[in-house]
Image (spheres, helix red, strand yellow):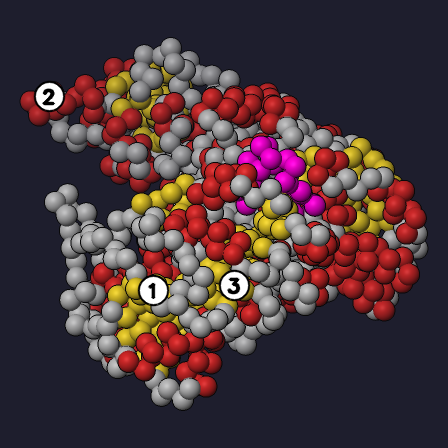
Amino acid sequence: MDTNIIPDNLQHPERFWVDYVIEATSKDHASQIAREICLEQTVELPGTTQAVRSVEAYTVGTLERIEFLGSNHNKHNHHHPPHSLYRVSIAYPNDTAGDELPQFLNVVFGNTSLKRGVAVEDVTLSRHLMQNSTMFPGPKFGIAGIRKLLGVPQAPLLATALKPMGRSSEDFASMAYQLAKGGIDIIKDDHGLSNQKWAPFEQRVVLCCDAVQRANRETGRNCLYAPCLNAPSDQIISRAYFSKDCGAGAVMLLPGITGFDAVRQLAADPCFNLPILIHPAMLGGWLQSSSHRRRGSCNSQEGGETEDEEDHPRGLSHKFLFGLLPRLCGGDIVIFCNSGGRFQFTPEECQTVAEGCHRPLGRFEPIFPSPAGGMKLDRIKEMRKTFGDDTVFLIGGNLLEQGPDLEADARIFLHAAGRDRQYCLPRELSHTMSFTINEEELTTSNFVTKCSSDVFESDAGIPSVAFVERVASNIRRRVLKYTLSNNGGYLSQACSSAETLATLYMRALKLGPSIAPPVPGPFQGSPGPGIRSITGEGFNGDPADLTLDRLIFSPVHYAVVLYSLLVEIGRLDEKAFDAYNVDGSTVELIGAEHSPGHAVTAGSLAQALSQAAGIGYARKLKNATGRIAVYMSDGEFQEGQTWEAVQTMVNLKINLVAVVDVNGQQCDGEMKQVCNVGDLARKLRAFGAEVHQVDGHNVSEIEMAVRHRSELPSFVLCNTNPCQGIPLMKARAPKLHYVRFKDTAEKRQFEHVLASMNHKVCNSGGNSGDNISTGVTNNISKFPSVAERKPSAAETSRGEFSKVATKVDVVTRPHRAHLLEWMKLHPTAIVVTADLTSSCEADMIRDKLPQQYLSLGMAEQNMMSFCGGLAREKFTPWIHTFGVFCTRRPFDQLAMSIGVPNLNVKILGFLPGLTTPGGVTHQAIDDVALCRSIPNIRVLECGDATEVLSVLDVAEEIQGPVYIRMLRGEVPRLFPSYSPMKFGTVRVLSEGKDVCIVTSGICTEEAIKAREMITTSGVQIRHLHLSTIVPFPVNVILDAATSCKYGVITMENHLINGGVGSATAEVLAEHAVGKRLIRLGVPNCYAHGASKNYLVSEYGFDKYSLIKAIEELCHKKLIIVDQEDAMGQTRVAVKELPVCVERPEDL
């Protein structure tokens, strides 16, 4: 039973209890004093007043019990009547505490602490207060969590202090390095170290963190350095975060000086995830005296006497002050003065401290007591017998007295504590306990109650198979939670890969501890001038260490699975996962090389293996002993580059192991139905590679196969089940690639699965997942939404823009149904996809017109040449895939197989520009430039639903290859249905003589909004919308540019180089038009994964950016008109868009 929770069946479950020890002459006198305490601690008025009577029922404490403890009579003093000691229990209403820690402490002992003869012995919380995690956050780590961080499953922990005050930061760093090398678990600042001039705080923390991290890399351990945060109250949080950012493993607070609420505030901060040490400085003045405690422990009869000299109860008990209170506030280790040292604590008092740290307390994890205060090495055996192994032994001065060799001194400490063989993970497995810890795991008090048998396979500290399997289950649960919260996710990938990835990280590979920040920063820009290249490989260890293995992650759409694993094993902070697929985050939907755990850019698939081969060969030349491992999917064997890489690795004898998720699935369904790769093992062996086939859900089989070494590259084919752990997924077969729930009923079924998974985990003593059923909040403040976007300098100078929304119709998936009807009328047309049928809205052709449909799998180079062959036989291929996969990836095949022979192939490139959150590998920001460079290819771009519905007819009329930048999903209708797209026609959306705006695609809608916002500014705008980009409308652009006063602005969803902006510049230059040109679009850089609205704003081609460009061109500030309807909603004054003036261009 939890000893500090009031049972529901007691009289006042809505109250918390405080046990006081008071001095009184009789039981009646004790009752009178207790009544005075009830009033003093709440209303602070006599109980007879009318004001008190009106509120007494719900404010004033009530006396619940009185217990006689013994006599406190002084036989040497006959001038005072004899006194006895009583324990009185008073129950206070919860509301008196106001759900705040300072007020709670005020009610417990506030004014009464000034009285003589009263002491606080214990506090018992109500269930309401037990559940109040803001008021009482409790320890984030506790005993189990700190053991996991350190990799010490049993035996006492060892700590020491950097001292003395007066030494330099460099001296302390040298001490820290030697002590960490010697095996100390926790190295803390001495409590006297603050921000003194000889060792300033920031300088000391930087140097000591670096020193301890260097020692950790050399030993494979995870020693924790804890800076002292004895600082002014307004600097405590900032110093804590500075310490965290520098790589500190813990922090130390002095609540006797800075207050217990400082501890609470830091522990309750969801973004701060380091253990907290509590130091006792100045708490001595709060303590209960010792003599009456000895009397209280005797079994005297009422009225009996003792031989002790007179003393009066006062202060707080050791159990409450050093055990219960720090634990409630969020401390993980509490330092106190052991008996027999420099301070006057008795053995009994010290035992009560340990009791307060360890006893059952509901959701509050047990914490480490740390006896200190002049302790010596020769007392460790005695202390171990007294306090047990769940203790941190803190020895400072006596350790430094052993001699100048601190590393050797530390080993003496280890020997004295029975730790001759240090508990730490082997170097290749030390990553499992790296830096951070999964907070959800720490919500269960039983999580690591028996570390050696439950988590660790042996004293060597290798994670057990059972523990790896539990991590795999937690991965699936986490991904399912995300999928439910966001109505979509890569769930089958978690089902198939969880055990394999967990085994690679936890048992099979020799990875180092993470050197990356647990919460990665926001995206800083793609590598280029002034921006260095950043990868997420640091989460897997130091890639520069040639003794360590390196893991290259290829199927980056599995990113959510990898992030979940990194959180589960402590390499990634829980809050970082909340940033998954959030605008501005590096924790991207489709992982990029700057994403956690990723080493290379691999989103277009089949490229990581070749890059890994190059890395492996380079490390071979450097005589590296660590191996290269690649995790990849079986679908990547549909790409020819994979087989080219296999050839290279075999010929160069590169020591590389490729671990393959063989789940038989791809985007369009089962691989054997889409593009069967056949017997992979046989094919790989035919290339000369070594092959191992294993059960991809059997940890031991995976580990054995991966650990096997050979001179040849080896492939571990992990046969997996895409529904493993979630059998309900089978009902969705054969389409398992991405789960988007069909309806509420299906979603409810998956919610039941999640609830069942939570129940099983709780009952097994694992990760409780108390909040696993709640939705992902995605409220990371570092990554502002578009609505929170900071205004530009131009915006700030004139006030914020109004939120203007043009009233337009939105058509859902217009291409999908139209394509079916159109194909029925064109029997020689064939829709060809590259494993993206549904994603490109061609699924109705697959289902209704299978004779006019082909899916060629993930093999785009082959698809381009294949379609060239079809066209030679008078069929018209209509390729449907993402823009990057039909231009950038197969560029040579596009040019040679289609462009050169001028074949009648129509290519629909979906997700043009920055219309996808899929990141750099999925964003077609250069497709127009590539196609402009191939003679014979015409380029069209859809700007609205009307153009989507008419572009097929336009392309059909053109003889030769056509590339179409296509829109999907929710598409606005800007142009009336009776004004379809026409080849070589420019739509004139407004007339004017000041500025010419040229837009295409999605930018046209942005430009319309911008125009409506500045209608009263006095600037006349000629707005041209291009749907035909190649051939470029030279005459129309030339006419508009020469007739406009200030110049031309182009805005496109593309790089500013190579697209509409470049084409316009060419026209102006070739015809010597001396007008200013401003090009808006993606600047000369790569983008990252985020929402469309965020990206167009971030990269400067939204309506705000256009208005700013108009101001720059005209050299004037514009008047922004706010127009609101009767409901108070800002909108554009709606007018029917006119039928566009059409200007056929000479082709």
User: Residue tagged by mark 1?
Assistant: 1142
Which residue occupies the foreground of this view, 986 or 1050?
986
Which picture quadrant has residue 987? bottom left
Does the magenta segment cover residue 881? no
Where is 576 relative to 743, above or below?
below
User: Residue tagged by mark 3?
Assistant: 939
Which residue occupies the foreground of this view, 359 or 849?
849
Does the magenta segment cover residue 847? yes
Instruction: Give the residues in magenta.
Output: 834-857
- Circle 1 — which element? strand
Marks 3 and 2, how far apart in space?
A: 82 Å
Marks 1 and 3, how far apart in space?
A: 19 Å
Mark toward the start of the polypeptide (1 vs 2): 2
| Pointer 3 with pointer 2, Cβ within 8 A | no
Which residue occupies the foreground of this view, 1032 or 547?
1032
- Circle 3 — which element? strand
- Residue 119 has which mark? none
Q: Position of residue 1021 (x, y in %)?
A: 25, 71
Look at 80% across and 60% down and name the residue there: 613
Q: Amino acid at mark 2?
A: Ser
Is 166 left, or right, of 833 in this rendering?
Answer: left
User: Residue tagged by mark 2?
Assistant: 54
How many neighbours does mark 1 have within 10 angstroms: few (below 14), some (14-19), or many (20 or more)?
Answer: few
Mark toward the start of the polypeptide (1 vs 3): 3
- Circle 2 — which element? helix
Marks 1 and 2, how far apart in space?
A: 83 Å
Is 387 left, or right, of 746 in this rendering?
Answer: right
Q: Amino acid at mark 3?
A: Val
Look at 71% across and 42% down and name the residue there: 501
